[in-house]
Each structure stands twice: as structure tokens, then as C-alpha cells.
Amino acid sequence: MNTVPVFIELPSAPMQDIYRTIRQLVGSDLPFFITGETGVGKEGIARYIHENGPRRDKPFVAINCGRFTAELLQSELFGHEKGAFTGANHQRRGAFERTKGGTLLLDEIAEMSLEAQTMLLRVLDLKTFTRLGGNENLTADFHITAATNKNIGETVLKGEFRPDLYYRLMGVMLDIPALSERPEDIAPLVETFIGEFGPEYGKDVRGITPAALTRLEQAAWPGNIRQLKVAVQTAVALATTNTLEVKDFPYNFFTLPAAVRVDGELTEKKDTPPTQDSISTLISQLRALPVETQCQIIQAVSERLPSFLKKETLSIGDMNLCEILCHVAKVRIEKYPTLVKAAASLGIDARTLKVYARGDTDITDDSVESLDFF
């Protein structure tokens, strides 16, 4: 069953700025142009525009231009008369006609063919149109909102989008930030999705644990709100208690690569070396934990730690990397009955352990790489 998604105002500062802009300008009947990555909630913003404007009591019609071929999109927008083309067995009202007095959202408008763009521009300028295969002039009375996940300026420069239509539509430009840039919006979204899917799956789920929420807030979410919704839906379906826990969320939801926009397209974000500030922050957080917990964390990340991080000279208190190695080596020598066993506990040979215990500063990258505890 298709239902209209529940809309909630999100608390993050970027979204609040967008809501304020909409409320200030929605009465002007200026066209709105919404940009943002796939899944950030562009249609939700379009509905917010409609519901806060003077046309709120009239229809809201959303057309995804990327779902239709050039020919079918023209029929979807303009409608057609019986016999207009093969398969047109009856008259059909298009989106322009169905939206009379209301709001028309043209989602993924950058996917529209140049021919359809020309026809749309004519409708916007003349305020009239005819059904395909017809002669009757019909009045075009709607407020238009367009949306895309592409860099619309780039599509214009490439000749894929008419510049005159671009200028005609760019009345109020709204750019929706990625969900990863506004983690404070995740909690209210999760609450909304729990309320939606709990009854659907017959679950009395009432909330989410702080640990699970923290994991959601730290995740990359390249699919944005749409991906978060699927994650919560899955967790609700798997939940065995009335509170969502980390175990209820499939692991892949936390490990998908982040995405960045390059030349208007989404691509996987590449890892970049951490800055010294971020390293210092991590070390401070690590030092605040019990010693046993520190060891567990170091062991857990040992296989995943990138080589560039192992090669950094890190300070813990007044100790640099060489001094840390010296200290660890001496502790292991005291703990184990033989030098061989002490070295084996660190995954190195006895000769290397002696070098560390002497505090030798000539430590190679390869020797650091071999350490089990690092």
C-alpha cells in the first residue's frame, strides 16, 4: 500500500535555515529548485513547500523524470487523446492537468530530454498546453518545484540542460545537506520510522538504545535518509525487545563507504591520513579508559591500522613512540621467564625485542609493522 511519507521538521541548523527560507518566500509563487544527494529528502522538502504555501488545499503531484523514456514522459506531463499513438486506447489527463491549482514537483529534472525541456519551457512561459494528439488549449495553473541530485550547472555547461529553462526555474535555490553532515537529525528520523514500522511488523518497539543511536549518528549513510529508513525497518523486523539495539542492525549498514560528489556525480570517498589534531584527540580518549580496555582496543585495531598511522611519532604523556616501545619491551621481559617467550608475545624475534629494550631510536617501519600490539 502506497502512503504519503510522514513529514517532520528536523532540528539541525542547516535544515532550520531551509525551512525559514521556504516560509519567507513560499507566498511569492517563485519556482523552487532543490538539489542534494540521492535520498536526502528532496520530495519531503517539496511537500513542505506545498503545505506551507497558498496552494496547500490543491493537489500535490510528483513526477520522477528519470523513470520515463522521452516519449512516455511527454505523455505523463501533457496527457494524451485517444489514438494519439499506438496503445493510446483512451484519453488520459497528464500531470499538468491533474495539478490544476496545486504544486508540481519535477524530480530528477536533469534526466529530462532536451525536447521535453523545450516543451516544458513553452508551458511555463505561455501558461497553456495541449494533450498529445489534441487541439484543445488547456490552462497551466500550477506552482512548479524542480529537484535533482546532479550538479545542474555542469549539465548546462555540457549542453544536456537548456540554459533558458535553468534560468526560468532557479527562483529559489535550496541545497539539502547530506545526512552525515547533520547527525542531530538522525534521532527524530529514527523515532518517526520506528512509529511507522512497529505496527507494520506487529512489534511494540518504543525506542533505541544510546549505543545503537550513537552508531547510527557516526555512520556514513551514502544513501542518506532513504538508507537510514531501510536500516530502521530491518532493525524493527529483527528486534526481540521493545528497544532497538546494535545487534538488530545488520553490520553492513555501519560499514558502507561514504560518498562524495565529484563533477556532479557520487563516488566512493577515499581514506585520507588523519591530522595530528585528530590523532591527539584519539590518544586523549584512549588514555581516559582503563588500562585493560586500552589493551583490548589496541589489539582489536592492530590488523586494520594503516601503515601511515603506525609510522607517526605519537606522544602519550611525555613518551614518544620509541619510548613507548622501550617501556613495553621491558615490561614483557619482566613478565615472561625467557626472552624468546617475551618476544613471541609481541610477535617479534628476541633480537628485535632487545633493540626496543635498549631504547634504540633507529626503528624501521617494517619492525613497527610487525608488532601485534600496535
Image (cartoon, grey):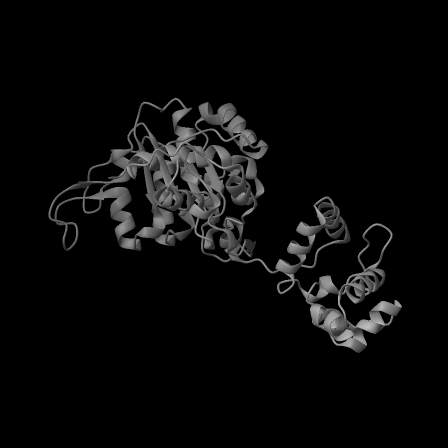
- Say which of 203 and 65 sits in front: 203
Closest to the observer, 332 or 57: 332
Q: Is residue 237 visible?
A: yes
Residue at 72% in and 50% down: 291
Residue found farthest to the left:
89
**Visible residue check, residue 171:** no
Most distant residue in the front direction? 337
**Location of residue 80 in the rendering, given as x and y in whole percent from the top left corner:** 19, 44
Q: Position of residue 18 (x, y in %)?
A: 53, 32
**Residue 259 percent across, percent down from the top left:** 53, 54
Q: Quadrant of the rendered structure where residue 237 is?
A: top left
In the image, residue 25 above or below residue 97: above
The C terminus appears in which quarter of the rendering?
Answer: bottom right
Q: Residue at x 32, y 30 (%)?
A: 141
Taking depth in this image into account, of 343 and 164 the one nearest to the observer is 343
Query: As rendered, which of 201 and 342 lies closer to the eye?
Result: 342
Residue located at (40% from left, 47% from top): 109
Q: Quadrant of the N terminus?
A: top left
Whole-percent x, y for residue 193 in the image: 40, 36
Say if 95 sits above or below 261 in the image: above
Q: Tell me: 112 left or right of 216.
A: left
